[in-house]
């Protein structure tokens, strides 16, 4: 059922950052929101900007939450250029 998936306790995200340095700030932001990164894969050099980077991350939530709301919340972290949920 789609509603169950949209409110599961973990969410898989693709996130692009302005700079590689912004990844550390994002990790701190996730922890401040009472969430945990359980898996992270770094993808270097996104697009023409050599200093930009992207990650694939699995975020574990403290409790079930609407994934659209989580995407909105985490998109506000400093240095995030693009963020989307991936299957």
Image (cartoon, grey):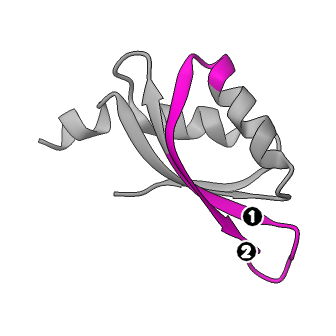
Question: Is residue 47 inside the magenta stretch?
Answer: yes
Q: Residue at x 68, y 18 (%)?
A: 32
Front-most of 83 and 26?
26
Residue 77 in sight here = no
Q: Quadrant of residue 25?
A: top right
Residue named by callout 1: 53
- Please provide percent x and percent y for residue 16: 69, 60
Going from the N terminus, do you reach mark 2 or mark 1 first?
Answer: 2
Q: Residue at x 85, y 58 (%)?
A: 19
Left or right of 43: which side holds 71?
left
Q: Residue at x 37, y 16 (%)?
A: 63
- Please provide percent x and percent y for residue 4: 19, 34
Q: Residue at x 88, y 68 (%)?
A: 51
- Please provide percent x and percent y for residue 35: 54, 23
Residue 72 in sight here = yes
- Please provide percent x and percent y for residue 66: 38, 30
The dot on residue 46 is: 2
Within 10 angstroms of label 2, few (less than 14), some, or many (20 or more) residues?
some
* Span highlighted in magenta in the image: 31-57
1 lies above or below 32: below
Left or right of 3: which side holds 9?
right
66 lies above or below 2: above
Left or right of 74: which side holds 19?
right
Q: Quadrant of residue 10?
A: top left
């Amino acid at each position: 059922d789609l509603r169950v998936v949209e409110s599961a306790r973990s969410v898989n995200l693709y996130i692009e950052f302005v700079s590689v340095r912004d990844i550390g700030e994002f990790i701190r932001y996730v922890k401040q929101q009472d969430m945990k990164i359980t898996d992270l894969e770094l993808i270097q050099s996104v697009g023409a900007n050599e200093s930009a980077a992207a990650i694939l991350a699995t975020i574990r939530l403290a409790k079930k939450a609407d994934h659209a709301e989580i995407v909105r919340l985490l998109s506000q972290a400093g240095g995030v250029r693009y963020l989307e949920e991936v299957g």
